[in-house]
Amino acid sequence: MPSINFNAPAMINVNRLNHLGKGLMRSMERVASGTRITRAADDVAAHGVAEFLRGQIRCMNVAARNVQDGIALANVAEGALNEMHSMLHRIRELAIQSANGTYTDEDRKYITMEVDNLKAEINFISETTHYNGHTLLNGRGEWSTGKGGFIQMGPNSDKDVDFISHKIPPVNTVALGIDGDDLRVDTMENAQEAIDKAAAAVEYINSVKGSLGAIANRLEFAWKNIEKLGEDNLAYESLLRDTDIAAEMINITRDQIISQYSNAMLAQANQTPQSILQLLNR
């Protein structure tokens, strides 16, 4: 029965249009932002998981940079050791030269001058090799004492999993066994002893370099693993949070079509009370 005070069909269509309008706005917001979840109310469970993953991803990015810093530190130390290596080979050459019976003690004084300067340079490199203020080779810095230096390579505080430590032994003339009178080339006999001492010093540096190379390789693999974990977490976070553009465009098209015929039905519903006027005019 037609009614003047309440037009039920019109109200139904108005409510439907309001609902469709909100749906269209939400779908357009998702398409425009590219994000399916912009507030917790959109999907409470997925929002919580996505936020956790976002935090993990950011932490992993920092951890990856930490590992790269550790690799750089190891490379700095190894570069200094390479120079010491070259100088020890030169000291060994000079010892072999001085051990030859064709040289006089006066000749050996000049050889001694070069050896002493090389030993002084080894100590200078030991004292001045550092990374971001941390001395690496003189045996006194954080990376040479106690448990050694720490590298945070994960997003958590578990030291058994997300920390690694490495200790670099001191590398100077004392540690190498060539300090002062420990290695001399001023006589044939001393020069002959110096040959073996220089060879032992080379082996010592080889062991330190091998240890640094091992930790650098570990850090390289750790970095690759962190990068892969970050990619996987990012993919999962994207799956939870990002908009399915194709699905939302289908929703938008559907709601627009429904809106069009709902408007048509509203116009038709508004014509219904007109029948009452027609009755009054009779």
Image (cartoon, helix red, strand yellow):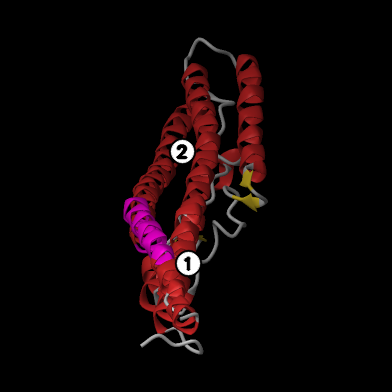
Quadrant of the snapshot with the N terminus: bottom left
Residue shown at 55% from the left, 12% from the top: 103
Instruction: Identify the element where label 1 is drawn.
Output: helix
Residue 195, visible in the rendered structure: yes
Coordinates of residue 116 in the picture (x, y in percent): 64, 30
| Residue 141 magenta-highlighted | no
- Whichever of callouts 1 and 2 sits on the residue coming sooner in the sequence is 1
Q: Residue at x 46, y 81 (%)?
A: 282
Q: Which residue is mark 2?
A: 201
As displayed, is residue 67 above or below residue 82?
Answer: below
Q: Nearer the viewer, residue 49 or 202?
A: 49
Name the side, left or right, on which 218 lies relative to 78: left
Most distant residue in the top direction: 102
Residue type at mark 2 is Ala
- Count the marks: 2
Report which residue position mark 1 lands on: 21
Looking at the image, can residue 53 be seen?
no
- The residue lying toward the viewer, choosing from 258 and 69, is 258
Relative depth, front residue between 70 and 33:
33
Residue 101's place in the image compared with 229, above or below, is above
Tag 2: Cα neighbours inside 10 Å, few (<14), some, or many (≥20)?
Answer: many
Asked if disc 1 and disc 2 are in contact, CB closer than 8 Å, the reply is: no
Near mark 1 (Cα within 10 A), the count class, few <14, some 14-19 or many ≥20, is some
x 47%, y 65%: residue: 26
Amino acid at the residue labelled 1: Gly
Span of residues in magenta: 240-264
Residue 79, placed above or below residue 33: above
